[in-house]
Image (cartoon, rainbow, N blue to C red):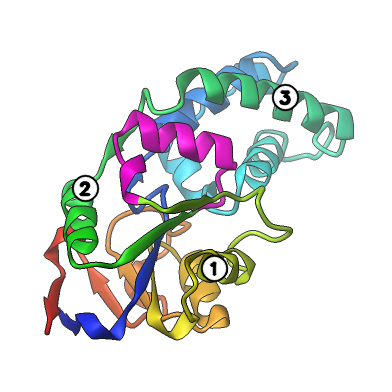
Amino acid sequence: MPWPLRQFDAAIVDLDGTLVDTLGDFVEALQRMLRDLPKPFADFTVTHPLVERMVGKGSENLIKSLLAHVDAAQTATNSVALYEQAWARYQVHYQAINGDFSAVYPGAREGLQQWQAAGLRLVCVTNKPTAFANTLLRHKGLDGFFLHVVGGDAVARKKPDPMPLLLACTLLGTVPARTLMVGDSSNDAQAARAAGCPVLLVSYGYNHGEPIAAVDADAYTDTLNALHWAD
């Protein structure tokens, strides 16, 4: 897929599902969190397919979705105290295992190296809390590629709202039309369209259980190092 390099000044890159397969981290942290809660939550087994459908809209939404799934009758999940307890335990457990059960996707590191060598300025934009994102990037040796990291707690509204992408463009000093959004889900595509950024989606990752080809995007790729820049 050749794209004119002169078309872009920078790229905004998503983290979970685009650069790093973090499902294992989510599953482990959520499982430990549930064990700290009363029944029926403590007895529930968290699976990868379940988390894959729920992930992508921030940790708060992930936890609320899981609690609601476990307690389908809504007998306990309406409790603010329960959510606050779950959120507190999740933060402790995720911080303890962040990056231990995850892996960089094939071609992701090489893709970043190619883009950096081509002169593109890079910023990581994720719905993950900024501290967790920075730790994960360091853990996987990816932190050196990015001029900035914009986490879900850096703005008032997360993706699919365009606010994080617009902040990223401001930090980079670029205009959205010349800033490529690279992601793995409809959240990334919707945010890019609303911000005015061109969007590239990877064919792997987490798209709420829906086929990525059905999402409106300018291009798709199987690996990040498969892109070919035309002069």
Task: Name the residue located 65 percent from the left edge and 17 percent from the top edge.
Answer: 42
Circle 1 residues within 10 Å: few <14, some 14–19, many ≥20: many
Stretch in magenta = 126-145
Mark 1 and mark 3: span between their CA atoms? Answer: 28 Å
Task: Name the residue located 84 percent from the left edge and 34 percent from the top edge.
Answer: 75
2 is higher (above) or lower (below) than 12: below
Which image quarter: residue 214?
bottom left
Image-based side of 104 in relation to 125, left or right:
left
Q: Closer to the camera, 206 or 230?
A: 230
Task: State yes or no: residue 139 in magenta.
Answer: yes
Task: Classify the position of the N terminus by image quarter.
Answer: bottom left
Name the kind of residue labelled 2 in the image: Arg
The residue pinned by badge 2 equals 109
Image-based side of 111 in relation to 129, left or right:
left
Q: Secondary structure at mark 3?
A: helix
Task: Name the residue located 22 percent from the left edge and 63 percent from the top edge.
Answer: 115
Please report whichever mark, 1 or 3, sits nearer to the chain's N-terminal start: 3
> Residue 197, how many percent across, how many down?
45, 80
Is there CB contact under 8 Å for labels 1 and 3? no
Image-based side of 2 in relation to 62, left or right:
left
Please report whichever mark, 1 or 2, sits nearer to the chain's N-terminal start: 2
Q: Is residue 18 visible?
A: yes
Please report whichever mark, 2 or 3, sits nearer to the chain's N-terminal start: 3
Question: Which label belongs to residue 165?
Answer: 1
